[in-house]
Amino acid sequence: MGLKRYIFKSGLDIVAPLKCGTRWLDEFDVEERIDMFHFTSHNKDLEEHIHSGTTFIWRPVREHFYSAIQTECKLRPNKDIWDIITKMEIGLIGHWHPNLYKKLYPLWLKFNFKFYKLRALSQLTSSSSKSKWTSNLYSFPLPIGHDTVEEALKSLPPKQYIKIQKWINEEEKWLKLMIESQYSEKRGDDYSNLEDSMLEMGCTIMDLEDEVIQLEDMVTSWEDTVLKMKKWGKEIKQHNVNLKDRCIELEDTILKMQSWNTKIKQSNTNLKNRCIELDNRVLSLENKLIEFAKDKLNKTLI
């Protein structure tokens, strides 16, 4: 599975698995950001990034697993849910692993690093208020054909469903061993109830503020649209006036062309009559020449 590390200028050194606030943490201006590293049952990447000053972000195991399932179903819509879970088991999918806390336990014994609950993450640093985050910002749809992830898992064969429950229970056992000592007499599930309530309230307020901003943007957009429509109306009206003027010009041109056509026809008629008149005169002259020639010839013969 994938994890990310964030080192702040204050010295705060956070390691967070995917689905444990990494997208929210990505928005911070940290001093050093370690690219995502991967955990499998065999590699040593986890050991290279954990030390006594580490703050490890956790969330309830079942909640983490269900969230990972939703994400993977979204990313791999053509994959069967058991195929996705099988790839999680062997480390080919980055959002959950059934042995994370079991492998983390020896490192915790060695370094005694701190844990911090995902739901109280916004109170971890004073600069968190600068990050734009809402409780529904990164929601993913449920597996196709199911109303809940639990329902989708129960649709699996009993043997597979039981195996998943064993994974979750085993991870919960190892996580509990680490966080219970840190939170004294409080059970891990009860930790930060106050912080959770404040965070939920803060998220609700932020969600409402975002909705107000969205509504304001919508109103502004509508006002802009109305102004544009008014402008377009004026432009269309002017265009219609220009078009009407152009039509009048075209009508005048047509009338002129019709007048010219009439004149041309009359001129052609006159030209034709003139040609006939000339033909008649030529014919008359030819006849006179013939009469003259005959008369001359007769006189010569006498």
Image: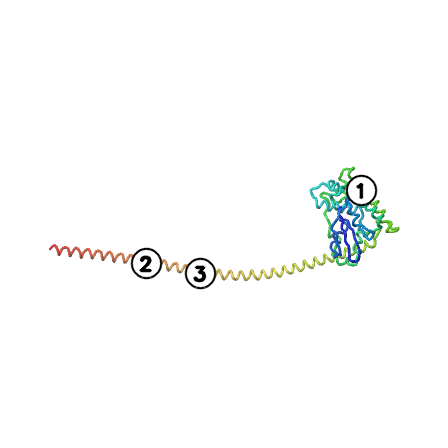
Mark 3 and mark 2: Cα distance apart in space: 26 Å
Give amino acid for label 3. Answer: Thr
Q: Is residue 194 above or below residue 166?
A: below
Residue nearest the observer in this picture, 239 or 71: 71
Asked if marks 1 and 3 touch (Cβ < 8 Å), the reply is no
Question: Farthest residue in the right direction?
Answer: 185
Q: CA distance from mark 1 to mark 2?
A: 111 Å
Q: Earlier in the sequence, mark 1 or mark 3?
A: 1
Type of amino acid under label 1: Trp
Answer with left or right where residue 147 lies relative to residue 258.
right
Precedes in sequence: disc 3 or disc 2: 3
Give the secondary structure at mark 2.
helix
Q: Secondary structure at mark 1?
A: helix
Q: Circle 3 — which element?
A: helix
Look at mark 3 in the image and give the residue it sits on.
Answer: 253
Residue 271's label in the rendered image is: 2
Q: Quadrant of the C terminus?
A: bottom left
Which x, y percent locates residue 23? Answer: 74, 52
Question: Disc 1 marks which residue?
Answer: 167
Locate residue 297, reporting x and y percent: 15, 55
Coloration of the structure image: rainbow
Q: Position of residue 191 (x, y in %)?
A: 84, 51
